Image (tube, helix red, strand yellow):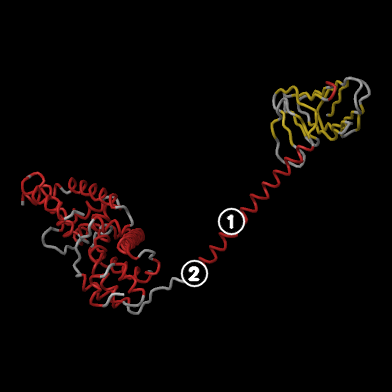
Amino acid sequence: MLSDKQFAELKTHTEECQICRAELDRCAQIQDIIKQAFSSQTSAKQASRTILSQIAPRRIKPASTPSFRRQTAIAASVLLAIGLLLGFGLAKVTALRRIAALAATKTPIRVTDLEGTVLVRHQGSDIWQILQANSNIHVGDTFHSAAKSNFTLEMKGKSTLEVDQNSMLVLELSNGETQFHLEHGKLAAALNSPHAPFFISTPHGRVEALGTEFTVKVE
Amino acid sequence: MPGKCNLTNASDEQLVTATIQGDTSAFGIIVERYWNMAVAIALSKIDNLVEAEDVAQESFIKAYSQLHALRDPSRFAGWLSKIAAQQGVDLLRRHARNRTISSCEVGELEALAPASISNANPGLTNEQTNFVRQTVSKLPEKFQKVIIMRFVAGLSAVQIAKKLGKRHGTVRVWLHRAYQILRKDLAPLFEEVRQS
């Protein structure tokens, strides 16, 4: 908004400057035609009387209590928030427990060689993950080698277990004695003597390693 | 609360408070103050003046019944302009639905449209009035609002800023940009007026 001084200055200037005078006139013209184009046929006083006669029987809605629907919506939102918090909290706790359990079942057996795609599923989990070379495996791990894939596990004393393609192997025990379960497929063991008790179970029977090299095949 | 003799000079805030406390005459002053603005806002959405006045009337009634929902009474004008614009859009939607239902009437309605433009002022012809309204309605929504508040309701940039809850500088920029667009788009009309 212009101050009185600014307004006086503008007035003096527009009296002298034709360009600014023309611009001011154009502005007034625009204001005038917009006012004309948007003017009402009904006078403001008349409109006021009409509207007041219509609102007389009405009441302003009270602002105090929210509607039942709104209350329900708020309650639902609160419950949802609590549910989400609990859900996230439980998920986090479960994940932490799983990590802790996984750490407890870690063995010194390592994946030394890996070709193609080999999947691993930890005990208690439904998720299959890609087996990484140079990682340690855990008790309860299930391994699945895809076609044209194989992997080698290295145990204490440089003993190795080579698992062939299309095989499924589970590490059942690793507490002084070691036991794998070969569900299907083929593996070749090379054990350096002396070695701790070592077993391979299959759906058809259990094999105990007495010598140093042997192959087990389940079709 | 101001006395009745002072109501005319009372601020929007005082009038809204008085209305909530049961003084309907205070709302009468509000209607007088913003009637032209509400009609103009409705006219920026609807071509028909009679319908625009109906929309403005409905907007005031709606504003009255929901006055408690207005958090800042000093922003009544901005709030009312939103209600009027929404009511205008709702009416257009109803028209569109009716046209879809009875498509055979579409041609007739469209043919009638230019003739149905009511013009309250003898200064502009119906065509010129229509041209000005169309030009304004082509402006972005925020520009339409400030131009109407400035030119029709006669509010200053400072007052508009307060009522819309915007910064003074923002409103000045909007007014300036809206003015530049109008100056360019309304040029053919000025030429026509000058020649006649």
A150 vs B119, left or right, is: right
Instruction: Determine the secondary structure under disc 2.
Output: loop
Query: In the current view of this chain or complex, which residue is farthest to the bottom?
Result: A57
Where is mark 1, residue-wise? A81
Q: Quadrant of residue B17?
A: bottom left
Specify the amino acid type for callout 2. Answer: Ser
Q: Nearer the viewer, residue B118 or A53?
A: A53
* Whole-number angstrom distance, CA of label 1 to CA of label 2: 21 Å
Labels 1 and 2 touching (C-beta < 8 A)? no
A211 vs B70, left or right, is: right
Which badge, 1 or 2, comes first in the chain's sequence? 2
Which chain does the numbered disc 1 sit on? A
Q: Nearer the viewer, residue B115 or B171?
A: B171
Where is mark 2, residue-wise? A67
- Tell if the residue under mark 1 belongs to the same chain as the one under mark 2: yes
The numbered disc on residue A193 is: none
Quarter of the image where the C terminus of chain A is located: top right
Q: Residue at x 23, y 59 (%)?
A: B155
A102 vs B4, left or right, is: right
Q: Residue A138 at what x, y percent from top left?
A: 78, 34
Specify the amino acid type for callout 1. Answer: Ala
Q: Quadrant of residue A208?
A: top right
Which chain does the numbered disc 2 sit on? A
Q: Residue at x 80, y 28 (%)?
A: A109
Instruction: Determine the secondary structure under disc 1.
Output: helix
Mark 1 Cα-neighbour bin, 10 Å: few <14, some 14–19, many ≥20: few
Q: Residue A111 at what x, y percent from top left?
A: 76, 26
